[in-house]
Amino acid sequence: MSNKVDQNRREFVSVATKTAAATVVAPGVLLHAMAQANLRSEPVTDKVRYGLLIDTTKCADGCSDCVTGCEKENGLDMLVEPEGASAEDWDRQRPRWIRTVKVKDRLTGQLSTLPLMCQHCENPPCADVCPTGASFRRADGIAMVDRHICIGCRYCMMACPYKARSFIHEEVERKPTIAPRGKGCVESCNLCVQRRDNGESTTACQDACKHGAIVFGDLNDPGSEISKALREQNTRQLRADLKLNTGVRYRGI
Amino acid sequence: MVKTVTGILLIVATLFSMGVMAEGQRQNAVIEGSKAASLDACVAPTSLMRRKHFELIKHQRDITVHQGIRKTDDSLAGCIDCHVAKDSHGKYIPVNGVNPETGEKQFCAGCHEYAGVEPPCFSCHATVPTKSGK
């Protein structure tokens, strides 16, 4: 409830700022202010913890719409195969934020297809091992890489039990503004952090999934769709034995 | 005494001409046809921007990455949005590149080359504005 009040106040302040801007500044500057209207101006807090719920019972075998959606949003589809690389190497090493994985219960033979991305652990091993502090967990629960201080040692890739991280091996010709990317840095799913800071409520994978298998939301807000679903359904963490308290939960495995 | 006065006059004249030069450079440095060319000054006075712009973005980058604050004037994306120019076909020219038609070095490249600095911004960051993430 208090969140709602804060939100209204924020909107009021935002409107007030815009009105003030309209009356005072030049047209060019006004345009700039308008474009920034939804952008975050306060630091993220741990009152929010973002996460995903993936319902593998809705995941269709052979479907990779979430992967395509993710790659389009985060510019991974702009990467080109380096000259002289074998197709096999490229396929194995190209950066991917989501992989589709098949898991089989050896006893029953039950087969599930699921998208696997960074699990946004509460205690992320990637951040534990990072020698420079480039791997970190943002206050709102997003495990991220600060590429400004990443030295490309790839220790985090070794530490991650989910094989969620990729390394950029070559110079990158084309990169989107919202997802900078360059040779010698590690990267992984950041829950579309640009959308988080822009007041949007979905992730690209969620938008791309036509089966409705992916729900994104705030795990700390009892009223959010994801929290309600988690309360009502039987869900699991991958490798729960590692006690990482992941932000990504799965149903049906 | 005469010598001293002449000396002072010389110094004053030199300072004045430097001021004029700086003014001339200001008008030339901004690429014609970019949004920046239509504005009087950047997010801070020109003299400050010339010497300290990297400090502004370097400070901001940590705040943006770690705290998520993107509502700011000191953003690299802002530099590019404002200082990028288009070629005669209306296509953006990378801010760290050269206009292929005129050979004119673009805003970032022109000065960085002159100053002999190679900031690594553009090995990762986009050099043209990209809409809806592209």
Image (spheres, coloured by chain):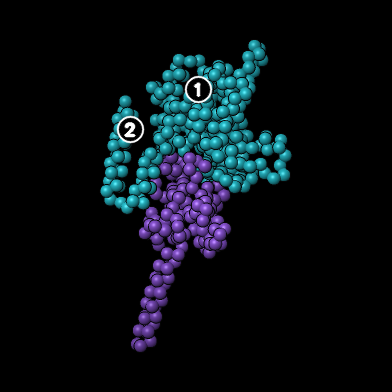
Tell me where residue B42 appears, x and y as whole percent.
39, 56
The picture places residue B65, in percent across and down from the top left corner, at 47, 42
Residue A91 x, y percent position in the rendering: 67, 35
Image mark 2: chain: A
In this view, the residue farthest toward the front is: B89
In the figure, residue A87 lies in which quadrant?
A: top right
- How packed mark 2 is, by other alpha carbons closer than 10 Å (few <14, some 14-19, many 20 or more), is few
Q: Where is residue B54 in the image (x, y as percent from the top left)?
A: 47, 55
Residue occupied by mark 2: A7
Report the residue marked by disc 1.
A212
Question: The C terminus of chain A is located in which quarter?
Answer: top right
Chain A, which colour? cyan
The subunit carrying tag 1 is A
Chain coloured purple here:
B
Q: Is residue A110 above or below residue A16?
A: above
Along the horizontal axis of the image, is B81 left or right of A170? left
